Amino acid sequence: MKIIHICLTGSYNDNWSYQDNLIPKYHKLDGHDVTVITTIFINSKENTGYEKVRPGEYYLANGIKVIRIPFKQFKMNIVIKKLRLYQNTYQKIVGEKPDLIFIHGLQFLDIYQVVNYLRYNRNVKVVVDNHADFSNSAKNFLSKNILHKIIWRYCAHLIEPYTTKFYGVLPARVEFLKNVYKLPAEKVELLVMGADDEQVRRAKNEEVRKEIRKKYGIKPDDFLIITGGKIDTAKKQTLLLMEAVKQIENENVKLIIFGSIISELKKAVNRLVDGNKIQFIGWIKSDDSYKYFSAADLVVFPGRHSVFWEQVAGQGIPMVVKYWDGTTHVDLGGNCEFLYMDSIDEIYNKLVNIINNEDKLNKMKYIAETRGMEYFSYKKISSKAVDL
């Protein structure tokens, strides 16, 4: 089967561990002919901004074809960029002759070019996913009432007659499709994000766990907590986690934090780092996150949702995460516990309760391994669109 993945709502980095990288990867591994049509923008190395790359066509090492297309050039460039109008979208689709089009994010006006192609190729299957909800989108009057409720809703209804399924990648994003874009409920489903099965298998090796722990002076009998991701104003709760761990008197409890950090918070983080109990190791490659999480006894995400939540669930590791309405799908019956307040005391009490209760931790781990690794497997997730 020839599958095109269209990723035109933002940046796209080759070989990263995001959903729009891993679903194409597993489509390719399943024997399909796969092309990604995307923008000329990539995230900077530490995921702190955007960089431009050259437009053109090339192949990744795994055989996936990547086509990068620039914005159209008009005097009102700011409008073109905001509405996402690209050069030669229609021609690139025609050249690929797809059997299935997987659209990652419908928030680009050039979706009408996809529709133009589908009008004359009604046998092509289409699925669309959505990564927008009220935690990351529609935060001001203009965004909510003009962009989302008029322009992007128009895009949604333009593609709807040709689409088999609209997928929200979180429960909150399923509701966004139904309530903001007013799409028919029977066409909308949850398609979770997950973990790269190959990376999970490699990280499960006991030697990997030992290597990471040894590198940072973590003894075999230490209880290691790990958290990771971008530390910014939306995820300042990492500082509360550091304070809570600092208060735990058990010297065998250790915390490792990785990720990028905004300049305004560097002093506050460095003040809490002591080189022994709490270590901040900076940015790491996305693939290496699997190794680091595998070294943990418990992973904690005290702030806003990130793709790491599903990854860790797919690695079969117990978690403590912040409660957000519409993101509780990571709980498969006890593999994780929730934090309800931005409070040092709540984090402290939650951690101590788990650390001092071996039966509780073992139960969390059992559910994580027996349910999480199956449910959040990208191999299984990627097959869902093809099975349609």
Image (cartoon, rainbow, N blue to C red):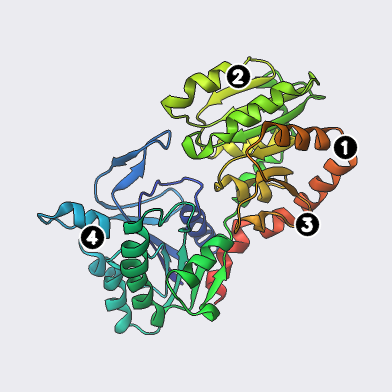
Q: Disc 2 marks which residue?
A: 272
Q: What residue sits 53% from the left and 67% below the top?
A: 175
Q: Are marks 2 and 3 in contact (CB under 8 Å)?
A: no
Tell me where residue 280 appears, x and y as whole percent. Answer: 58, 23
Picture disc at residue 86: 4
**Label 1 environment density (alpha carbons within 10 Å; few <14, some 14–19, many ≥20):** few
Q: CA distance from mark 2 to mark 3?
A: 34 Å
Amino acid carrying label 2: it is Leu
Amino acid carrying label 4: it is Tyr
**Label 4 environment density (alpha carbons within 10 Å; few <14, some 14–19, many ≥20):** many
> Which mark's residue is nearer the viewer, 4 or 2?
2
Q: Are marks 4 and 1 in contact (CB under 8 Å)?
A: no
Q: Disc 3 marks which residue?
A: 333
Q: What residue sits 47% from the left and 34% below the top?
A: 232
- Viewer-side residue, 57 vs 176: 176
Q: Disc 1 marks which residue?
A: 357
Q: CA distance from mark 1 to mark 3?
A: 18 Å
Of the image marks 4 and 2, the number of the one nearer the N terminus: 4
Q: What residue sits 31% from the left and 64% below the top?
A: 146
Viewed as shown, does residue 99 lie left or right of 187? left
Amino acid carrying label 1: it is Asn
Q: Are marks 4 and 3 in contact (CB under 8 Å)?
A: no
Q: CA distance from mark 4 to mark 3?
A: 45 Å
Of the image marks 4 and 1, the number of the one nearer the N terminus: 4
Query: Of helix, strand and loop, which one carries label 1?
Result: loop
Amino acid carrying label 3: it is Gly
Screen quadrant of the C terminus = bottom right
Tell me where residue 104 appears, x and y as whole percent. Answer: 42, 62
